[in-house]
Image: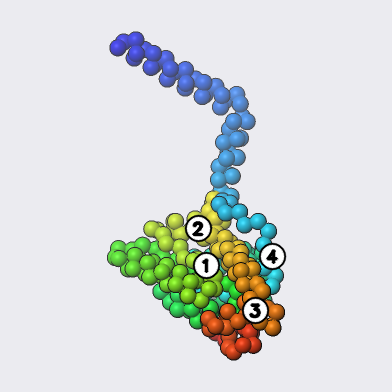
């Protein structure tokens, strides 16, 4: 027992001396530690590799909430940066506001049925409070957005943050202090899925020569057999 105590004391003393000696005589170690702190403040990289995407012919609709306006505005900036990086022209990015997240699925359904955009991004922020309101809204919005995806065959990206506190929101809506703006990923996802949809429907149209016109018209995108009219939606 005495031997173990003495051995522990010697190890602690040796470790302390080694640590002090190295930091005093090796400033590079101190510089490395300082550099690590600086690196931690940089933006985190996306966990998804999107590769090269060409969205130059696409039209992207962004539906955003006014609820939690500051954070959602940051997400929208990220979305615009993401789709722009994929070569989508600025004039082909349309943004429309709705009051809150609960209204997103309905607005998405209206936009999808208009046939005026190739993909939709629903952006919002939900933060858990003291009641079950968060759970009910989150579940309803999630299911609603998925229903629009499958019911209209228009890509609708789920861009709603569901967080426990505001700190989590900031880390996911900003590239500062080691965070990552998820809006950038949502923008690229919309482009990728719009391209996938166009490729899947390619060659199935009628005399218009445009991909999938007849199938889209049958789903309520535009009217008649003349194909989809992609004029700017009236509510943008």
Residue, x 37% and y 67% (percent of image)? 139
Spatial distance from mark 1 to mark 4, Cα to Cα? 18 Å
Q: Is mark 1 on a helix, strand or loop?
A: strand
**Front residue (pair 233, 165):** 233
Left or right, 170 with respect to 204, comes to left
**Circle 1 sits on which residue?**
157
Vertical arrangement, residue 166 with respect to residue 67, above or below: above
Q: Crowdedness of circle 3 by 10 Å Cα count: few (<14), some, many (20+)? A: some
**Circle 4 sits on which residue?**
54
Residue, x 50% and y 69% (percent of image)? 123
Q: Residue 172 carries which label?
A: 2
Sequence-first disc among 2 and 1: 1
**Front residue (pair 38, 58):** 58
Q: What element carries label 3?
A: loop
Q: Is mark 4 on a helix, strand or loop?
A: loop
Spatial distance from mark 4 to mark 3, Cα to Cα? 22 Å
Q: Residue furthest top?
A: 3
Question: Residues at badges 2 and 1 in contact (C-beta under 8 Å)?
Answer: no
Sequence-first disc among 3 and 1: 1
Q: Crowdedness of circle 4 by 10 Å Cα count: few (<14), some, many (20+)? A: some
Q: Residue 205 carries which label?
A: 3
Spatial distance from mark 3 to mark 2, Cα to Cα? 40 Å
């Amino acid at each position: 027992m005495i031997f173990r105590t003495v051995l522990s004391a010697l190890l602690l003393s040796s470790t302390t001396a080694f640590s002090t000696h190295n930091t005093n005589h090796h400033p590079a170690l101190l510089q490395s530690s300082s550099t690590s702190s600086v690196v931690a403040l940089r933006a985190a990289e996306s966990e998804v590799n999107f590769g090269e995407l060409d969205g130059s012919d696409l039209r992207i609709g962004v539906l955003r909430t006014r609820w939690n306006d500051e954070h959602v505005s940051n997400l929208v900036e990220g979305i615009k940066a993401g789709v722009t990086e994929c070569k989508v022209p600025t004039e082909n990015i349309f943004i429309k506001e709705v009051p809150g997240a609960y209204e997103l699925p309905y607005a998405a359904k209206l936009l999808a049925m208009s046939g005026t955009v190739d993909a939709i991004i629903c952006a919002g922020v939900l933060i858990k409070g003291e009641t079950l309101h968060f759970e009910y809204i989150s579940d309803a919005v999630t299911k609603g957005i998925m229903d629009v995806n499958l019911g209209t065959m228009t890509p609708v990206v789920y861009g709603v943050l569901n967080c426990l506190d505001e700190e989590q929101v900031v880390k996911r809506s900003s590239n500062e202090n080691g965070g990552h703006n998820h809006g950038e990923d949502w923008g690229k996802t919309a482009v990728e899925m719009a391209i996938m949809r166009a490729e899947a429907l390619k060659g199935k149209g009628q005399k218009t020569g445009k991909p999938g016109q007849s199938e889209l018209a049958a789903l309520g995108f535009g009217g008649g057999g003349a194909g989809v009219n992609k004029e700017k939606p009236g509510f943008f």
